[in-house]
Amino acid sequence: MKTVFIFISFLLLVACSNKNAELAKKHNDEGVLFLDKEEYGKASESFYTALGQGKINAELEAGILRNLSLLHFFQDHKDSALMYAEKAMNKAEKDTYYYFLTKAEFALLNENMEVAISNFEKAKGEKPDEMAIYNSLGMIYSGNYGVKFEDQQKALVNNKKAYQLSQREPLADALATSYMNVNNYKESIPLWESLIKQNPSKMDYHFQLGVALFFSGQQEKGEEKMEYAAERDENCRHMLDEMIAE
């Protein structure tokens, strides 16, 4: 299985009342797109340019700082990730959605799951239709932060809600994986097929589709798909060899 992001970066849906804020939001949104593509140098330049636009509202600034925290996390710069997460939390107005969200993510970075879950739930109370909450809870309950908090049924519920709110590639990936983790292979098939259309060169998607087909009763098609991926990707070959050994 693939590595899942800690939480999804987001475009800032805030009102821009001045030119500085408009430019800051534009550069932030560009940074998010670069971040999703793992173009970290370009993402960094965009986020710092966004912060350099002068006076902007607190919500927008908190969001940019949050995305900078993500950027440093993805680059394994945990201290910097924590610093920007704390700055984002302190910038957000207390007891608002962004305050609870950034407080939860700061707790995630510190591996304090109880505090993280509590604050994600508080954030959900403020904005019940925000994808970032469900994505993060989905990863916690999927077991990405240890088996103590693993609950695959809860993971499925949260990943399904996150995908309903935004059909982005990482969310489809997480939902398809959740279906497989509860042995509902059939439901994962259209998601893997959609992911392959979006990113046909990613052999892991082909392999996971093969697994889903195999365990949903289409053994021959599944074996063909897994072998196709294994011939083109060393990691897929390793996963197939492990399945055969079992």
Image: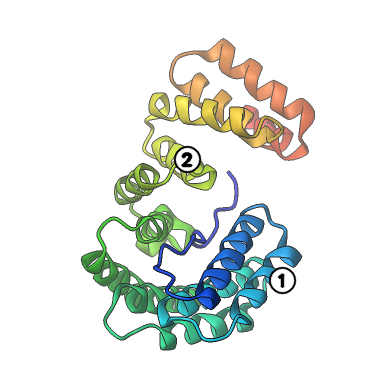
Residue drawn at (34%, 58%), measured in percent from left and top?
130
Left/right of residue 66 with respect to residue 159 in the rendered view: right
Q: Quadrant of the C terminus?
A: top right
Q: Are marks 1 and 2 in contact (CB under 8 Å)?
A: no
Residue 210: % across, % down: 57, 24
The mark found on residue 82 in the picture is none
The mark closer to the camera, 1 or 2, is 1
* Nearer the observer, 182 or 134: 134
Q: Is residue 119 above or below residue 207?
A: below
User: What secondary structure is marked by label 2?
Assistant: helix
The residue under label 2 is 172
Name the quadrant containing residue 196.
Answer: top right
Residue drawn at (36%, 59%), measured in percent from left and top?
137
The mark found on residue 45 in the picture is 1
Q: Quadrant of the N terminus?
A: top right
Query: Is residue 98 at least partly visible in the picture?
Result: yes
Query: Is residue 110 at least partly visible in the picture?
Result: no
Residue 161: % across, % down: 32, 47
* Nearer the observer, 137 or 35: 35
The kind of residue on which mark 2 rests is Ala
Mark 1 burial class by Cα count in 10 Å: few <14, some 14-19, many 20+: some
The kind of residue on which mark 1 rests is Glu
The Cα atoms of the two marked residues, 1 and 2, are separated by: 28 Å
Residue 6: % across, % down: 51, 62
Left/right of residue 215 with respect to residue 128 in the rendered view: right
For marks 1 and 2 on the same chain, the one whose residue lies earlier in the sequence: 1
Left/right of residue 203 with respect to residue 101 in the rendered view: right
Left/right of residue 219 with respect to residue 112 in the rendered view: right
